[in-house]
Image (spheres, rainbow, N blue to C red):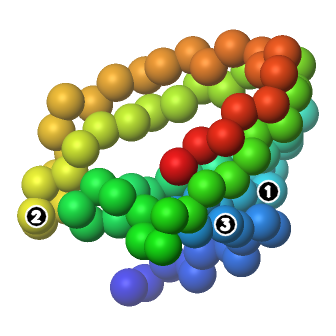
Amino acid sequence: MAGATAPAPSRHQLGGYREYDPPLPLAGWVESVWVYRTPNGGVPGGGAVHRVLPDPAISLAFWCRCESDGRPVAPRLTLIGAKTRPHLVA
């Protein structure tokens, strides 16, 4: 595709989670951009669990389900507040 660039390599990944450096226009306000993709079937394989550590930052998350052709369904924006204690997330 003309003018398209390859996606930046992730700086951290674990299971369906990928974290990236923010795009330059957002770098003054955003620490990172992250993506989590739930596996087909909705359950991570092998009992994958990760620990989310306390963090005073907030996240603005866009989330949705996807149709089989990739179209988003029921898109939402969610504000995720500061984490005051560790959490285990499947």
Q: Is residue 66 left or right of residue 17?
A: left
- x and y percent of residue 22 in the render? 76, 50
Crowding at label 3, few (<14), some or many (≥20) Cα neighbours within 10 Å? few
- x and y percent of residue 35 in the render? 55, 53
Q: Is residue 42 left or right of residue 78?
A: left
- x and y percent of residue 88 in the render? 67, 40
Q: Residue at x 11, y 65 (%)?
A: 69
Crowding at label 2, few (<14), some or many (≥20) Cα neighbours within 10 Å? few
CA gap between label 2 and label 1 equals: 29 Å
- Of labels 2 and 1, the one closer to you: 2
Q: Secondary structure at mark 2?
A: loop
- Of labels 3 and 2, the one closer to you: 3
- The residue identified by callout 3 is 14
- The front one of 64 and 86 is 86
- Of labels 1 and 3, the one closer to you: 3
CA gap between label 3 and label 2 equals: 24 Å
Q: Secondary structure at mark 3?
A: strand
- Residue 13 in the image: above or below residue 59: below
Q: Secondary structure at mark 1?
A: loop
Mark 2 is on which residue type? Ser
Q: Is residue 33 left or right of residue 60?
A: right
- The residue identified by callout 2 is 68
| Count of numbered labels shown in the rendering | 3
| Quarter of the image where one finds residue 70 | bottom left
Q: Residue at x 57, y 16 (%)?
A: 79
Question: Which numbered dot is residue 21?
Answer: 1
Closer to the chain start, of discs 2 and 1, is 1
Residue 29 at least partly seen: no
Q: Residue at x 68, y 53 (%)?
A: 50
